[in-house]
Image (cartoon, rainbow, N blue to C red):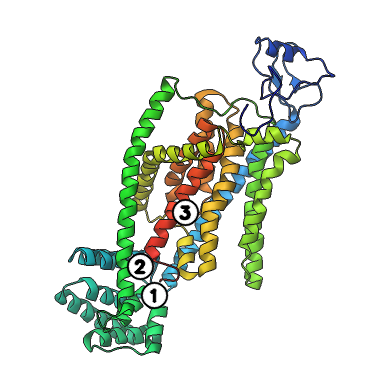
């Protein structure tokens, strides 16, 4: 008996409904009980005294699904395929639109902010290292639709990290671009900002409060650095943007160092687990074979995807018409899909067992297994990340996540919603859909082929519906492989949710370290 589950009758197979006292067992049930036949394949929901439809004849124990079950399975797969394809296309279009919006926005983007803050931060730690970032920063903005704004930011960055000769070169370039853009009709704000920056650095001019606010509003962290340049070196206001850059570098180096160390430990754990599994000292806890319903868990995935897409479309229209963002409503309503098996008649104890919604060998032990499994899976995740990086380098694709731009533009409530959805909602809901319902349905195929089918299929759909685009699929699938392995190993969903929450928390932490708070850039 697993913790938190009802005890099974003596001698009863947990993957078959309890026999009715008022109905004698069928021939197939008797042969199965004697070990003469494999478990029968049952119909959609066990009728009193029976488990399905006889296929090859009575007494053989061979059952085939009724036509209604086959139709339901076909419809569910069709819905999943259509929704997955639609999500992939819609999110690819959305990513392109977002990139266009970022290109059209004259304010600094995430990558520019990251490079500049890194350059200033590392230069404070090791003098001269910051100027090595300047060529990369220039390459990032080479095809910009806002050359005057970007050249203004390059001039600001050069003063902080470059030699006097390089600073002079950048300022001369800024004057040239300023003359060109003034002649071609650049915006008044862009012209005024470029002129103001040149006055700050060449004439030691201290901007007024209004000028400073405008510079910060249009250039974010860059504006803070420029506006405080002529303040006394001991002024806390002058130190703040520069200190935040150094804190970012220290934070990232600490995070990367910890990740490398954890990956080394994880590789050792992965090898140990593989050896223990091969010699039978470590066993999987997820039961395989027929679930308590042949289609309910597959249909759960289909219902989830329909709600996921439908609510986004409806609420997007509402936001377009009213300006009210109701995406929180979607997060609250989509999990209703998880109750589908209960709606179609699966008993609550069977539902919990199939979905892994139990304590396994104890809550804290399962949490520990999730942490250990995540560390052991870091080498697998690293391989996926490398593939994603290679795809990004060979194409113009980008695995960026939209939330990085939302955080840059949002306030505290955007931050709360982002952290809550990434660290709480996603682990609870996505694991219940993909590693509980979907994986359990696919795992009705026994043995290694069933494990490969369940892992690859559930991981691919999981990766495809995320908004990072095709470049992010290898990285996301590698994470899903680890989560599927935890589901297979422990049976309980707690380790999967734990590992998912830890991974998302680390990614979110890295994003917040780079941004140095809400509203920069």
Q: Is residue 150 visible?
A: no
Mark 2 residue crowding within 10 angstroms, few (<14) / some (14–19) / many (20+): many
Q: Secondary structure at mark 3?
A: loop
Is 145 placed left or right of 366 in the picture? left
Q: Nearer the viewer, residue 481 or 246?
A: 246
Q: Which residue is mark 3?
A: 468
Q: Are marks 2 and 1 in contact (CB under 8 Å)?
A: yes
Mark closest to the chain's N terminus, 2 or 1: 2
* Residue mark closest to the camera, 2 vs 3: 2
Q: Quadrant of the C terminus?
A: bottom left
Considering only vertical position in the picture, is 503 above or below 14? below
Q: Nearer the viewer, residue 224 or 67?
A: 224
Q: Secondary structure at mark 2?
A: helix
Q: Nearer the viewer, residue 440 or 456?
A: 440
Q: Nearer the viewer, residue 462 or 18?
A: 18
Q: Which residue is mark 2?
A: 113
Q: Is residue 250 visible?
A: yes
Image quadrant in which you'd find residue 228: bottom left
Question: In the rendering, which numbered label is found on residue 220?
Answer: 1
Is 168 placed left or right of 370 in the picture? left
Position of residue 159 measured from the top left corner of the image (x, y, whole percent) = 23, 76
Question: In the rendering, which numbered label is found on residue 304?
Answer: none
Q: Are marks 3 and 1 in contact (CB under 8 Å)?
A: no
Position of residue 230 measured from the top left corner of the image (x, y, whole percent) = 26, 84
Mark 1 residue crowding within 10 angstroms, few (<14) / some (14–19) / many (20+): many
Compute the Cα span from label 2 to label 3.
20 Å
Mark closest to the chain's N terminus, 3 or 1: 1
Image quadrant in which you'd find residue 382: top left
Compute the Cα span from label 2 to label 1.
9 Å
Compute the Cα span from label 3 to label 1.
26 Å
């Amino acid at each position: 008996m697993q913790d938190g589950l009802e005890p099974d009758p003596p001698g009863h197979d947990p993957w078959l409904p309890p026999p009715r006292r008022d109905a004698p067992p069928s021939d197939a049930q008797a042969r199965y009980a004697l070990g003469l036949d494999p478990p029968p394949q049952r119909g959609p929901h066990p009728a009193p005294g029976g488990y399905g439809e006889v296929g090859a004849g009575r007494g053989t124990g061979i059952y085939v699904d009724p036509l209604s079950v086959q139709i339901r399975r076909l419809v569910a797969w069709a819905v999943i395929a259509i929704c997955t394809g639609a999500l992939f296309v819609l999110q690819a279009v959305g990513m392109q639109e977002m990139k266009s919006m970022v290109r059209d926005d004259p304010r600094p983007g995430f990558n520019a902010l990251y490079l500049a803050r890194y350059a200033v931060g590392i230069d404070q730690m090791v003098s001269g290292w910051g100027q090595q970032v300047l060529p990369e920063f220039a390459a990032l903005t080479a095809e910009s639709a806002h050359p005057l704004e970007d050249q203004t930011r390059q001039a600001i960055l050069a003063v902080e990290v470059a030699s006097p000769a390089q600073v002079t070169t950048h300022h001369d370039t800024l004057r040239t671009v300023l003359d060109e853009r003034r002649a071609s009709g650049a915006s008044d704000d862009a012209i005024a900002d470029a002129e103001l920056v040149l006055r700050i650095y060449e004439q030691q001019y201290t901007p007024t409060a209004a000028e400073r606010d405008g510079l910060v509003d249009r250039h974010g962290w860059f504006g803070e650095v420029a506006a405080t340049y002529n303040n006394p070196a001991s002024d806390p206001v002058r130190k703040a943007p520069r200190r935040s850059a150094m804190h970012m570098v220290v934070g990232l180096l600490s995070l990367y160092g910890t990740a490398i160390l954890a990956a080394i430990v994880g590789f050792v754990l992965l090898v140990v687990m593989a050896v223990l599994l091969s010699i039978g000292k470590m066993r999987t806890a997820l039961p395989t074979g027929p679930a308590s319903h042949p289609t309910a868990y597959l249909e759960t995935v289909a219902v989830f995807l329909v709600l996921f897409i439908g609510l986004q479309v409806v609420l997007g229209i509402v936001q377009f018409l009213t300006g009210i963002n109701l995406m929180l409503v979607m997060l609250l309503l989509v999990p209703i899909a998880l109750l589908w098996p209960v709606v179609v008649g699966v008993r609550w104890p069977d539902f919990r067992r199939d979905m892994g919604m139990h304590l396994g060998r104890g809550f804290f032990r399962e949490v520990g297994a999730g942490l250990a499994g995540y560390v052991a899976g870091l080498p697998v995740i690293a391989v996926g990340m490398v593939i994603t990086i290679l795809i990004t380098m060979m194409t113009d694709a980008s695995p960026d996540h939209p939330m990085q731009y939302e955080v840059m533009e949002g306030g505290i409530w955007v931050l709360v919603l982002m952290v809550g959805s990434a660290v709480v909602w996603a682990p609870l809901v996505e694991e219940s859909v993909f590693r509980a319902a979907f994986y359990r349905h696919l795992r009705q195929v026994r043995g290694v082929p069933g494990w490969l089918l369940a892992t690859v299929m559930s991981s691919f759909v999981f990766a495809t519906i995320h908004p990072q685009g095709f470049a992010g699929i290898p990285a996301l699938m590698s994470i899903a492989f680890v989560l599927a392995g935890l589901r297979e190993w422990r049976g309980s969903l707690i380790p999967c949710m734990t590992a998912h929450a830890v991974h998302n928390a680390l990614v979110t932490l890295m994003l917040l370290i780079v941004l140095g708070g809400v509203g920069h850039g």
